[in-house]
Image (cartoon, rainbow, N blue to C red):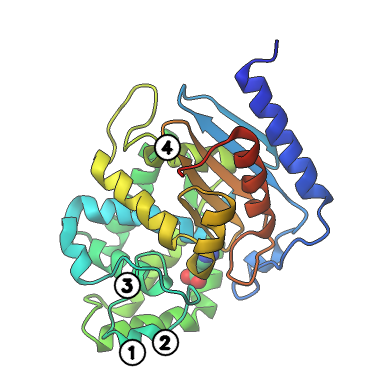
């Protein structure tokens, strides 16, 4: 008889087969030149289960920068040091606008709607700099992610960070606007330097699914139950992922996939199935909201087949 794990492996293989057969693949991010080189035919998925095992299919072992998914890790780190004081500087509501939109900031006194739009994430990184110098902050972020993943080989792709730094006019505009409202405490170049580097943290789907275990397993790493983030905090971060993790596509993602998840413009998505699994997918073509088109399709397929949902 087929074991549960064999059944899941077969479903992951099918998800990738369907993905590879799909003619509509979305559009690779072009505004960061290094990301524009990605091959839209790529598709991978990895699942880390409650027993600690990671299984995958397709291009699940090809490393990529995690981009906006890093915002989940910096939020967890920041709340760990700063606590709820962060919420004086950032909201917790869906934005209903693009991830790099500047419009709302003017109407809302420089308080970004949530920690996952770029402006909100820049404030979170700025708040981490209250405790650390930029180099130390980056070291803390990398060590935190390495600890969550259980892998000290995770590194930052300096070329991607540099590529974004050179072309990042929009983020500079957001950061300067935040500063003009008194909601950026460090020099723009310091905060953005850390932000670009955190976005360039590099992992394959297997590593990312392991890094996300704390979201699926109530703040722990799974089998050994090591508590990395408090249970309450992990649940609250997952709640914000569900409502804001896909920007203006969050409603459609919840409708189709039914899980808390966070996307990145490299085409990766991290999703949590509470108590059961942490999932990471990758396919570089994006939809109009900047979320992986094929990645969402793969997640929709797997969650339907496995009956995985929070609803
Ligand atoms: O700041 C940026 O624009 C990128 N480093 C990250 C944006 C991102 O990943 C949006 N998510 N889909």
- Residue 176 screen position, x and y as percent: 34, 85
Q: Kindly report the distance in space between the C-alpha atoms of the residues bearing marks 1 and 3.
A: 23 Å
* Residue contact at pointers 4 and 3, CB within 8 angstroms: no
Q: Kindly report the distance in space between the C-alpha atoms of the residues bearing marks 2 and 3.
A: 24 Å
The answer to whether the beta carbon of the residue marked 1 is less than 8 Å from any atom of ligand 1 is no
Q: Say which mark, if any, is on residue 103.
A: 2
Q: Which residue is mark 3?
A: 190
Q: Kindly report the distance in space between the C-alpha atoms of the residues bearing marks 2 and 4.
A: 35 Å
Can the viewer see residue 291 in this picture?
yes
- Residue reaching furthest to the front: 311
* Residue contact at pointers 2 and 3, CB within 8 angstroms: no
Q: Earlier in the sequence, mark 2 or mark 3?
A: 2
In this view, the residue in front, 247 or 139, is 247
Mark 1 secondary-structure assignment = helix
Q: Which residue is mark 1?
A: 106
Q: Earlier in the sequence, mark 4 or mark 3?
A: 3
Q: Kindly report the distance in space between the C-alpha atoms of the residues bearing marks 1 and 2.
A: 6 Å
Q: Nearer the viewer, mark 4 or mark 1?
A: 4
Q: Say which mark, if any, is on residue 141.
A: none
The answer to whether the beta carbon of the residue marked 4 is less than 8 Å from any atom of ligand 1 is no
Q: Kindly report the distance in space between the C-alpha atoms of the residues bearing marks 4 and 1.
A: 37 Å
* Residue contact at pointers 1 and 2, CB within 8 angstroms: yes
The answer to whether the beta carbon of the residue marked 3 is less than 8 Å from any atom of ligand 1 is no
Q: Say which mark, if any, is on residue 274.
A: 4
Q: Residue at x 79, y 41 (%)?
A: 17
């Amino acid at each position: 008889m087929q074991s549960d794990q064999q059944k899941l492996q077969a479903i992951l293989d099918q998800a990738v087969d369907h993905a590879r057969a799909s003619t509509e693949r979305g559009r690779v991010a072009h505004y960061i030149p290094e990301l524009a080189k990605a091959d839209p035919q790529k598709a991978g998925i990895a699942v880390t289960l409650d027993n600690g095992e990671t299984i995958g299919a397709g291009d699940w072992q090809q490393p990529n920068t995690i981009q906006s998914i890093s915002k989940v890790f910096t939020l967890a780190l920041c709340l760990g040091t700063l606590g709820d004081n962060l919420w004086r500087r950032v909201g917790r509501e869906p934005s209903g606008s693009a991830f790099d939109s500047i419009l709302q900031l003017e109407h809302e006194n420089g308080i970004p709607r949530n920690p996952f739009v770029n402006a909100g994430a820049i404030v979170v990184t700025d708040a981490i700099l209250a405790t650390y110098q930029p180099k130390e902050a980056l070291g803390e972020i990398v060590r935190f992610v390495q600890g969550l993943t259980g892998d000290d080989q995770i590194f930052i792709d300096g070329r991607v960070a540099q590529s974004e730094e050179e072309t990042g006019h929009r983020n500079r505009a957001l950061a300067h606007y935040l500063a003009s409202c008194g909601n950026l405490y460090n020099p723009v170049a310091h905060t953005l330097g850390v932000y670009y580097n955190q976005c360039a943290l590099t992992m394959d789907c297997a590593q990312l699914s392991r890094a996300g275990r704390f979201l699926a397993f109530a703040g722990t790493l799974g089998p050994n139950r090591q508590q990395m983030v408090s249970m309450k905090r992990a649940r609250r971060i997952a709640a914000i992922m569900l409502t804001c993790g896909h920007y203006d596509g969050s409603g459609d993602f919840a409708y189709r996939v039914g899980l808390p998840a966070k996307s990145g413009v490299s085409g990766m998505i991290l999703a949590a199935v509470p108590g059961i699994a942490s999932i990471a997918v990758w396919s570089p073509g994006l939809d109009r909201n900047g979320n992986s088109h094929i990645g969402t399709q793969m997640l929709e397929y797997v969650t339907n087949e496995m009956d995985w949902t929070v609803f």
